[in-house]
Amino acid sequence: MNNLKKHAVNETGELHLCDADEELLYCNGDNNKPDKSKPIVAVIYGPGSKIYADANQKLQNASMERVRKKGKVKTTAEQSSADSAEFLSTITKGIKNLEEGVEMTTDKSILKDLYQDRELGFIADQVAKYSNEWGNFSKPSASS
């Protein structure tokens, strides 16, 4: 097992967010142009972290509780969106340069609102996809 520990993943990974056209996002700088020195980056807890495992378990428990209470798995779009936003905001350590003048936004209510905003749904989709891929959290090899 000791030989495998060298392949352990990092607790977090960083995702440079993109807009709906898959263009990298940056804070606005002078003349309302992107400031390339201030990328908008989500710091995400990965599937190897306790925070991710706890958030995933909480999501599964909520689903099972609905089944127990109502006898069905079916949920509304609003409930599904709320569940997803809760999960994503929990596994997001913070987002760098999300707010002007704030190095990293960590307020869970702001993150949850972001993930529930349908017009910005591409952000939630990126974070969800990124968080489910173990390779995004792998440590750099010693030879790189």
Image (spheres, rainbow, N blue to C red):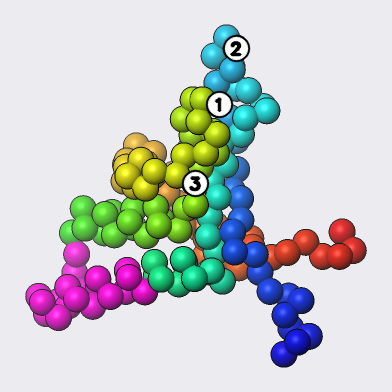
Q: What residue type is labelled 2?
A: Asp
Q: Element at badge 2?
A: helix
Q: Is residue 129 left or right of residue 75?
A: right
Proximity of marks 3 and 1: CB atoms separated by less than 8 Å? no
Task: Return the disc, 2 or 3, that comes first in the chain's sequence.
Answer: 2
Q: Which quadrant of the figure contains the C terminus?
A: bottom right
Q: Is residue 135 left or right of residue 40?
A: right
Does 128 sit above or below residue 108? below
- Camera-side residue: 47 or 72? 47
Residue 87: percent from the left, percent from the top?
37, 60
Tell me if residue 2 can be seen.
yes
Dot 2 crowding, Cα within 10 Å, few <14, some 14–19, many 20+:
few
Give the extent of the magenta segment: 57-75
- Residue on which disc 2 sits: 30
Q: Element at badge 1?
A: strand
Task: Return the disc, 3 or 1, that comes first in the chain's sequence.
Answer: 1
Q: How far apart are marks 2 and 1 (CA)?
A: 10 Å
Q: Which amino acid does label 3 sit on?
A: Gly
Q: Is the magenta stretch mostly helix, strand or loop?
A: helix
Residue 9: percent from the left, percent from the top?
66, 69
- The residue drawn where x is 62% and y is 30% is 38
Residue 103: percent from the left, percent from the top?
55, 34
- Residue on which disc 3 sits: 94
